[in-house]
Image (cartoon, grey):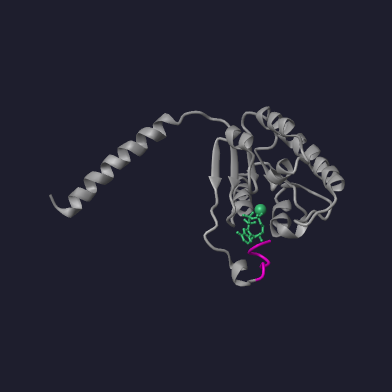
Amino acid sequence: MSDNSRHQERQQKLKEKVDARVEDAQQERGIVIVITGNGKGKSTSGFGTIARAVGHDQKCGVAQFIKGTWACGERDLLEQHDVDFHVMATGFTWDTQDKTADTVAAIAVWKEAKKMLADDRYDVVLLDEMTYMIAYDYLPLDEVIEAIQNRPAEQTVVITGRAAHRSLIEMADTVSEVRNVKHAFDSGIKARRGVDW
Ligand code: ATP
Ligand code: MG
């Protein structure tokens, strides 16, 4: 058997397997996606999903649980496409000292997120950096899980952030962990507009 026909045979078998699995996946419903891990690409993946949905004229909403400058460019673009944004109002940073103020700010954004999770006009809701709010105990885990589980059947939710709580991972349909192989910051390169925010 020639190399080429061996290749062809292998590809044919692979195709049959893939076709069978595609055939088996018949459920139609919105899903929960968690993008976690220490590498770069979590929020960009979340916003990529929003851009994809907007491209299909779907209604989207974003709740961001870390303030401003970290992820900004997307907002200016997506608001022009009727994407609703709710961004935490305090100067939440890594060196945050004021747990009470941060909790109040987190709950205010969560209230808006909850409205979107209860509204079947929204096809996709992005909860950017929400994992930290649970890790720091700023938001009640049970309430978050309940709101996501009771969302409209067709709605998809994307959650991003490092150290996703086990319960979020269990609840999700799709979980990806972005592993840090290397990052420009480690060789002294500044975060760049249009690339990092
Ligand atoms: P991005 O928004 O670029 O997709 P992210 O959401 O995966 O990043 P975050 O933990 O939210 O990552 O961090 C946001 C900022 O920190 C971005 O400017 C990003 O480039 C930077 N960053 C992400 N991962 C790393 C890392 N491993 N080392 C240093 N900086 C990082
Ligand atoms: Mg992020």
Query: Total of numbered circles in the picture?
Result: 0
Screen quadrant of the C terminus: bottom right
191 inside magenta stretch: yes
Magenta span main SS: loop
Looking at the image, which residue sits at the far bottom? 188
Q: Give the left or right position of residue 105, taking residue 119 as reference.
A: right
Specify the quadrant of the image occupied by residue 40: bottom right
Residue for point 31% across, 37% down: 16
Q: Nearer the viewer, residue 77 or 100?
A: 100
- Residue 62 screen position, x and y as percent: 71, 46
Ligand 1 in which quarter: bottom right
Q: Position of residue 131 (x, y in %)?
A: 68, 44
Left or right: 181 in relation to 102: left
Quadrant of residue 91 in the image?
bottom right
Instruction: Give the vertical position of 149 relative to 138 (above or below).
Output: above
Whole-percent x, y for residue 193 in the image:
68, 67
**Residue shown at 61% from the left, 31% from the top:** 154
Horizontally, is 58 left or right of 17 in the view?
right
Q: Quadrant of residue 44?
A: bottom right
Is residue 42 shown above or below 143?
A: below
Residue at left offset 80%, top offset 49%: 88
Which is more toward the observer, 110 or 117? 110
Q: Which residues are magenta?
A: 190-197
Which percent across, then down, holds residue 19? 36, 36
User: Could one spot residue 31 in this view of the protein?
Assistant: no
Q: Is residue 123 part of the magenta span, yes or no?
A: no
Please report the residue visible at 61 percent of the width from the left and 45 percent of the height from the top. 53
Q: Is residue 122 visible?
A: yes
